[in-house]
Every structure is written in structure tokens, then in C-alpha cells.
Amino acid sequence: MKPLLFATLLALPVAAAERSVVGMTADGTRIEAFEVAASAAPSATVLLVGGLSGEDESSRAVEQEIRKFESGARAFRLLAVPVANPARVKMVFPATGAAYRDNPESNALWRWTAVQAPDLVLIAGDDAGLADALSQNVVAGVGKIPALRVDAKPGILGSIKGAIPRSEAHQEIARRRARLPRQFAEQLANYYGRDFNQVTYLPGMALISRLRLGETADVEKLAAQYVNGSKDPLGARPNSLTLAGHLVFAALAEQTQNPAYVAAVRRAADLGFDEHGAMKEAMPFHDEMSDSVFMGTSILVKAGKLTGERKYFDLAARHLAFMEKLDLRPDGLYRHSPWTDAAWGRGNAFPALGLALTMTDFPKDHPAYGRILLAYRQLMAALARYQDPGGMWHEVIDEPGSFAETSATSMIAFSMLRGVRHGWLDRAAYQPRVERAWRGVLARVAPDGVLLDVCESTNKQKTLRDYLLRTAIFGKDPRGGAMAMLLATEMAGLPELP
């Protein structure tokens, strides 16, 4: 990606300011933000924006204000974006189009501002209609934010007098973050895991969370059609999503001891063996995608646990090794497929989740246990390097200008928390990362199940740019909702299913 266009603007170190990335322009230039903490907490947040017409005198005015502010009393938390539009494109507010493929600069600033939830926004110079848009609209489902256009000259922040009232957006984010894990999971259970029309992981992981919440009878009713002979859980054309969907039957088997559920799990896992019972090279339907570390491995381990048959653990270890050869990069991250080295967000979150679930039930006396534990720890360490200051992982893990992705963050945080709880990871190193991720997810999920910035369904893509242009969903989404529920039930310390 291209470096910041205004790199010379902040040539001297900014002592108190923390850097982060708002988003990217269409040509790959990162849009950078700076944060200076208040001298005391709690405090209001002020966002100062410049450069909405490109780098100009407003950008320099914002930079000067950062320097002056960080050396003073700092009565509030300051966020600053000196060059909000480095590509000098036409900005549109409220932001429109499919984020972040359309109007990427506008969508990035609009959605980032919503999650930051400032109490006041000051826009130096040309405001491109942003001040009115923030003040008059519920920003990305969060709330209105008072905003003013100001002249690009010294003393912008000095003009702020008196207490700054909490904005609607600030109050809403505070309410979201105040939710307890079980409360959050129960809210989402009103919208996700309400049907099981197809045996895939999308409703499946939400149904497992409902089981963890104690809603076993309701889940059994939804699953009954697949164990009473009226509907084949594998369907006419099984795929990797179907394999992962069978984790619901594994969870039900553990809760109810019903052998019909065990039979369903065994039938799915047996697809990894030929007609003579010999292991195949790997589980089928992997399509060379890293997703299969979760979708192919987890069901095998559950089959091994439920049946006591070693062959399923053997194949799980073989399948993991097969996927590592295809997709594991030398730096410890996963490419989504051999088509490109792009480290797609869920393309790493799926392996993280798959390894965490595998470790949960894999026998310690199996010869492959040590290797799988090492693989899990190495992936967690690789991912830890790329968590952003707000606790999130991104649409492309190693590109901070890509959007902060809610489903991948939920999955990775779950995987780390499971490791902390079982002692596979150092608590002091990873628990704070989980807590930051939890706060980030809470902020992006409304009580009515609407999620901000979940990547759309994604098959393997040919280029890094293809991944960067995937639509970031703002609305209800079964994938994102299920993974947020999964994290919430783990945070709540509910019984492990899976």
C-alpha cells in the first residue's frame, strides 16, 4: 500500500499522540488518525478533521493543533485526522454505496467516526457537507454527533469553552459496551439461530450458542427433521459448510447422549475415508481454502471424541497438515488460497477457530497433539501482532488500511480466550487482547442484531485488491451474528459446546 501523502507534515515526533488508520483511498493510500488522551478521565472526545479537499492549509492547521494540544492541560480526548481526503476525490456524506468498494474515503471516515463516537467534531476549512451530515443523521446506526465547520487557522481547539455534552453516539456506544456477555448473547439469540433450514455453520454456530444458553429444547425442535428421517442433513450435494454445520449435532450429542446425533456426526466425518475405510489425503470439499482448517478438522475431532475411534483424530491431524502445506505462509499467517498470498481476515479467523476447537477435544496422548498445539500457538502469536489499537482485526490481517472486520475479530478473540482458559496461552499476554477485542465487537453490534462491518460471503479471490473490495455489511448478518454470539458465550464462561 502507498504511504501517507502527508508524511512530511509530521516529520518531527508527536510525543503524546497514538497513530491509527481510518481507512484507505481507492488507490491504496492510508488515511491516518492521531489520538491524544485527556489528562484525566472520564472526559469528552473531540474529533478535529482537516484535508477534506486534499492536503492543504487545513491539514497544517490540524497538525499545529495536535502539537499545541499535547503539550497543554488536555481537558478532553483529542482525535485528529489531518488529511481525510488525500486522493482529492469528491466526498459524499452521509456516505453512500457499498462500503468500502464505493466512495471508500467517505465511507471510511463516516463509519470510523461512528465507532469513535466523539462528542464534538470540528472540521477545518472545506467540510464537504460533513458537519450537517453528522449533526442531522444517525451515523452508521450509532447516533447523531454535533459538528461544526471552523476556519483553518491557529486556535481552533482553544475556542472550545466549558463542558462538552455527551453526544448521542457517545451515549449509544457506552450503552453497548456496558452489556454483560450473557446479556449480549441473549440479545443476539432473538435474531440468530432461529432456523436450521440448511445444515451449515452459519445458523449452526448460533444454534450452538443457544445450546450454551440452555435453550436445548428449542434447538432440538429445529434439528429434529434431520434425525427423524424426514430430511438428509448432508443434502444432495455436501460441501464444507455442511461439514461444519454438523457441529450442532455434536453439541446436541454431548448434551443429550442421543445416539442419533452421534450417527449424524459419524456420517459426516466418514466422508474423509474411502469405501474400504482408508483415510483420504484430506477431508473433501476443502477447495484449497484455509476455511477448511475449521470446516474439515473440527467435525473429525468431535467424531473422535463421541465415538472413541482414533482414526478420526488421525485424519484431523493429516487434514491440518494438508491445509498448512497449501495455505500457511512463512510469517505464520494464512493465505486464503494458493491463488494469492492475501491474508484475508476470516481466512485467518477460520484456522484460529478450527485450531481452538481441535485443541479442546484432541487427546493429549496422541502423537500429533504437540504439533497441533504448536500450530495453534504460532497462529495466535502471528495474529496478535496485527490487532489494532481499538482491539480489532482487519479485512486483510496485515493491511491496517482495510476495514476493521467484526466476524473475524469475534472468531480470533474466541480462539485466544479458549486458549487462555485452557492454559495453552499465557494469560498476561492474551487476556488484555481478548478484552480489547470484546470492547470493539460490543461497539459494532446493536441490541437489535444489526452489525457494522462484516465481510460478505467470500470465495477464494485472485488478488489482494479483490479482498480489499469485498463489501462490508451494515445490517443483520447470520455469519457475523453467529460469531459474535460465540464470543459472548465464551466471555460469559458458559459450558463449552463445542
Image: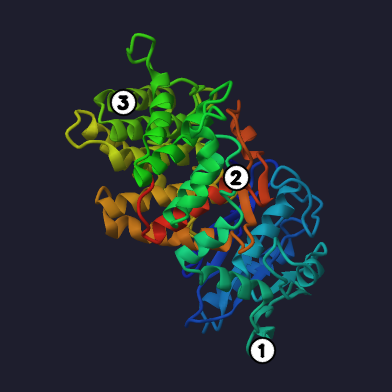
- Residue at image coords 64%, 33%: 466
In percent of width and height, residue 6 lies at: 63, 54
In primary-sequence order, the first of circles 1 and 3 is: 1
Specify the quadrant that holds the C terminus.
top left
Whether residue 159 sits left or right of residue 328 in the image: it is right
Q: The residue under label 2 is which amino acid type?
A: Asp
Q: Residues within 10 Å of mark 1 (few under 14, many from 20)?
A: few
Q: Nearer the viewer, residue 1 or 5?
A: 1
- Which residue is label 2 attached to? 195
Q: Nearer the viewer, residue 325 or 481?
A: 481
**Residue type beneath disc 1:** Lys
Residues under labels 3 and 2: Cα distance?
29 Å
Type of the residue with mark 3: Tyr
In the picture of the structure, the residue carrying the numbered disc 3 is 312
Kind of element beneath mark 1: loop
Q: Nearer the viewer, mark 1 or mark 3?
A: 3
Look at the image and tell me whether residue 12 can be seen: no
Q: Secondary structure at mark 2?
A: loop
Badge 1 is on which residue? Answer: 161
Which residue of the protein is positioned furthest toward the bottom in this rendering?
A: 162
Residue depicted at x 81% and y 55%: 92
Task: Identify the mark nearer the N-term, 3 or 2.
Answer: 2
How far apart are the two marked residues, 2 and 1, measured between alpha carbons? 54 Å
From the viewer's perspective, is residue 49 above or below residue 437?
Answer: below
Can you give x and y, in whole percent of width and height, for residue 479 in the image? 57, 44
Question: Which badge, 2 or 1, is on the more N-terminal residue?
Answer: 1
Residue at (42% x, 22% y) in the render: 283
